[in-house]
Amino acid sequence: MTSSNAYTLSDATRARFDREVAKYPYELRQSAVMACLAIVQQEEGYVSRAAEDAIAAHLGMAPIAVYEVTTFYNMYNQKPVGKFKLNVCANLPCQLRDGQKALDHLCSKLGIEQGGTTADGLFTVQKSECLGACADSPVMLVNDRQMCSFMTHDRLDELVDVLRAEAAKA
């Protein structure tokens, strides 16, 4: 469905978009942009520039406006990521409670740099902005859904082991 230069909306994807667009008055159809981005990511695993352009055309908005949304939020992947995307908070409260050390430990354990994906395709580690759980810092988010708090080195090691075991079962 995607290539580096083209992205064609399937009839099924277009129908999903239209269900989201129908939630808004016609003149506010651009409000469905986040839902449309989520649909593409769910189907493709990430949102390419070509997919952003297709969303923009479908919603009648400038491609840069879609790109601004994609790049603002950590939940949209702009390139393929691992089965487990690990976002580690980089804001000040987490940093004051060893957030950078947690990020560095995770990258070291997995043998990748921040923003990288392991060779086996299991893990991508990213730095993220505030996750809204400052009292539980350092915190991280797994696959944009599961919040993990008080992430000491031991807890990070345990999490990686559990996720690896989960992947092996699948």
Image: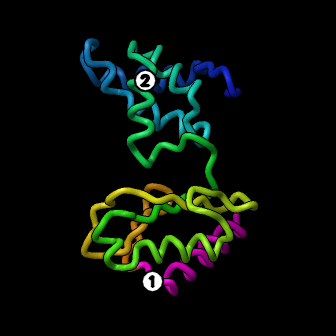
Residue pointed to by mark 2: 64
Is residue 32 among what the camera can see?
yes
**Residue 152 forms part of the magenta stretch:** yes
At 68% across and 70% down in the image, what residue appears?
111
Which one is in front in this view, the residue at disc 2 or the one at disc 1?
2
Quarter holding the N terminus?
top right
Between 50 and 167, the one nearer to me in the picture: 50
Alpha-carbon span between mark 2 and mark 1: 39 Å
Kindly give the residue lying farthest to the bottom in the view shown.
154
Mark 1 is surrounded, within 10 Å at the Cα level, by few (under 14), some (14 to 19) or many (20 or more) other residues, namely: some
How far across and down, in percent of the image, does residue 134 sit?
27, 70
At 48% across and 43% down in the image, what residue appears?
76
Residue pointed to by mark 1: 152
At 26% across and 18% down in the image, what residue appears?
28
Span highlighted in magenta in the image = 151-170
What's under tag 1, amino acid-wise? Thr
How far across and down, in percent of the image, does residue 24 sit?
27, 22
Is residue 42 among what the camera can see?
no
Left or right of 49? Residue 148 is left
State whether residue 126 is above or below residue 93.
Answer: above
How far across and down, in percent of the image, does residue 164 sit?
66, 72
Q: Earlier in the sequence, mark 2 or mark 1?
A: 2
**Residue 94 forms part of the magenta stretch:** no
At 47% across and 14% down in the image, what residue appears?
57
Callout 1: SS: loop
Quarter holding the C terminus?
bottom right
